[in-house]
Image: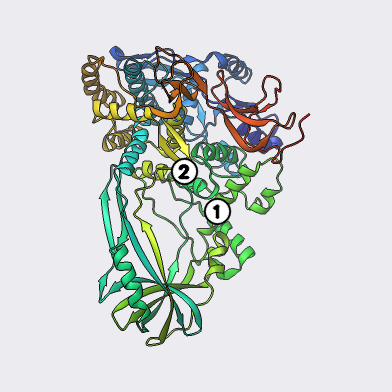
Amino acid sequence: MTLIVVESPTKARTFNRILKDKEGDYEVFATVGHFRDIPASGMNIDYNQLFKPTYAIAEDKQRIVDRLLELAKKHNNDVILATDEDREGESISYHIAYVLGFVNEKWPDFEFNRPLKRIVFHEITPNALIEALANPTTVRVNLIKAQQARRILDRIVGYELSPLLWKKLGKNWLSAGRVQTVGLRLIIEREKEILAFKPEKYYQINGIFEIGTQSEVKAKLVSLNNTAYEQKIKLTLFASEYEYSKTSITLEEKTNIVDDLAKDTYIVSDYSINESSKYPPPPYTTSQLQIDAFMKLGYPSKLTMKLAQTLYERGLITYHRTDSFNLSSSFVFKAKDYIKGHFGSEYTLDKPRGYKTRSKGAQQAHEAIRPTKFEKIPKTVKGDKKLTTELQKLYSLIFSRAIATQMAEAKIKSAKCLVLSAKGYQFETTFEQVVFDGFLKLTNPEFVDKHQILPTIAKDDKVSLKNAEEVESLTKPPYRYNDGSLVRTLEDKGIGRPSTYASIISNIQDKQYIVRDRGYFMPTALGTAISDYLSAAFPQLFELGFTSGMELKLDLVEEGEENLVKLLQDFYVPFKAELDIKKLDISPLEVKDSFLDELCPQCNLPLTYKYGKYGKFIACSGYPNCKYIKKIVRYLEGEFCPDCGGMMVIRYSFKTKKKFYGCQHYPKCTYLRFTMKQVQVTKPKEK
């Protein structure tokens, strides 16, 4: 009997379900994630021993390790490691091997003193698992070294810079991070760009025309005597370029133009029709899934990754940490059969469609995120009581995207109509018609419904102006980042890796460096002060190019082309020299407070917002002379306690550092829950 070790209890249950007909051959055990790591109690990196890390078993995981040792002994050390296929999964396999006595640690290298089986798979399905068990491999040493390099780099930066922030700000819960701070800086710099933007008022004029059988056609005024009204302005931002447009029409000109148009005559100067193909987007990678889940479902990155992990471990999708567009031949041919059966043969392809990845260092051996079971279509998943609504929605998104990649392209006719006046004013409008819906039948049927028939219009047709519509507008600054746009920028700039994006966003939120405002990220005064100080004090470390370059070096360690110790030395020597200089400056760092229109009840000085270890609160600006503070109570709109009818309040646990939801009448009423799920929308009668 063989012991299979995985990291997740859900994964263990899926394995047991698949291997139930092989009962007696295998026993599956879950470590419940990482159990051996660099302790958080100190640096635990020995600079004098080539950056050797000190590892320890977490106190709350000792029981699991004892059970693992007991099971390994029971199975005569006949062990198969089956953790996830990425660096973190390989690292867990390494530590399993170590505690079982298979590894001799001789930093910076290590060796296996006995053969050890490792299986790798992209999906948890019967075929994939049986094939992996029949073809075991060995632990991939270079992936472990790449994970150790990242872990040590992040420990050095975090544990060396965080105490610097503590001295500067007097708060010992603050933290800096090699990648985290760059993610924060993107948000801070964008806020500065928004504040520096000077909005300008401009006007757009639309003509409402009667053209042939079309009683109301709206067309935009674009030029006068071939001189365009629209102006495009391009700005260079910290992480990108921003282009916006406005017209040259002022308030005074707008009135004159409208009067002029009323006295003019019009004809169709041109009407052209073109047919083009619209192709489906590629299957999901980790980053694209996070972007789409936010844009279409409103899911934050952290939630998306948590849901995707569950879907993977339940065997419904392939591995969700990937940067590859590859799809297996098995999938594309089954997809063709599915498409033919559900939509008709005209929606299938003669040969499978493939996509080229744009991601630097993408792992081409991996697969994109796709469903693993064609019997698990979104309709049947909706009836699965074991899957929450959130899981069902994300699965449907993944299923549709993957199937669409193997569907025929849509055929679209587009028409461009130009209306010219006798005085030289030119208007422009466009129409679209879906000739063949192709993949849109699955992914966007609403688009098809809106674009049915092109109007019958001919060149030189006479046109009647029914009305001139005046639209007053302001030029808009760049948008603040949200989960989707921040992930897209991190990926484009090579900052972090797709599997780290959710934790980057989560960390800077948890530290109160940023807050969400209607889905967009806004920096706090604390976050701004920290970002500005660190980017000025360590200009190279927190530059986009330096951070992305380090990611490429970590990839080279994974590929066996970069030496782990050399990478760490090349980083640490200049970093330490810069750090020693900055430690000499002990001047405090000022955080510019946001004042309220309210005075302190104790000393009459203005109140201000502050950010502490457990969130935002109100305090006196006269601190430390006056120590008045007040909690900010945040109510859940439309939510009432089912026990007493009081309003539901967002609270924060000092022990777990997590949100929960309780009644406003606590401690008289002790009702609480830990999810956002609404219990009652209308207020019940109070008892």
Residue at the spot 25% in from the left edge and 77% down from the top edge: 225
Q: Closer to the observer: label 1 or label 2?
A: 2
Residue at the spot 61% in from the left edge and 60% down from the top edge: 338
Crowd band around label 1 with a 10 angstrom C-alpha radius: few (<14), some (14–19), many (20+) = some
Figure check: 361 above or below 216: above
- Residue 56 position, x and y percent, is 47, 14
To which quarter of the image does residue 486 belong? top left
Q: Quadrant of the C terminus?
A: top right
Which residue is at the front of the view, 491 or 215? Answer: 215
Any part of residue 12 in sight: yes
To which quarter of the image does residue 336 belong? bottom right
State the mark number for residue 672: none
Any part of residue 102 in sight: no
Q: In the picture provided, is 226 more to the left or to the right than 559?
A: left
Q: Secondary structure at mark 1?
A: helix
The amino acid type found where label 1 is placed reads Phe
Q: In the picture provided, is 63 more to the left or to the right than 602?
A: right
Q: Quadrant of the N terminus?
A: top right
**Coloring scheme used:** rainbow
State the mark number for residue 331: 1
Q: Which residue is mark 2?
A: 286
Measure the alpha-carbon separation of dots 1 and 2: 19 Å
Which residue is at the front of the view, 78 or 50? Answer: 50
Residue at the spot 61% in from the left edge and 27% down from the top edge: 660
Figure check: 27 above or below 456: above
Query: Earlier along the polypeptide chain: callout 1 or callout 2?
Result: 2
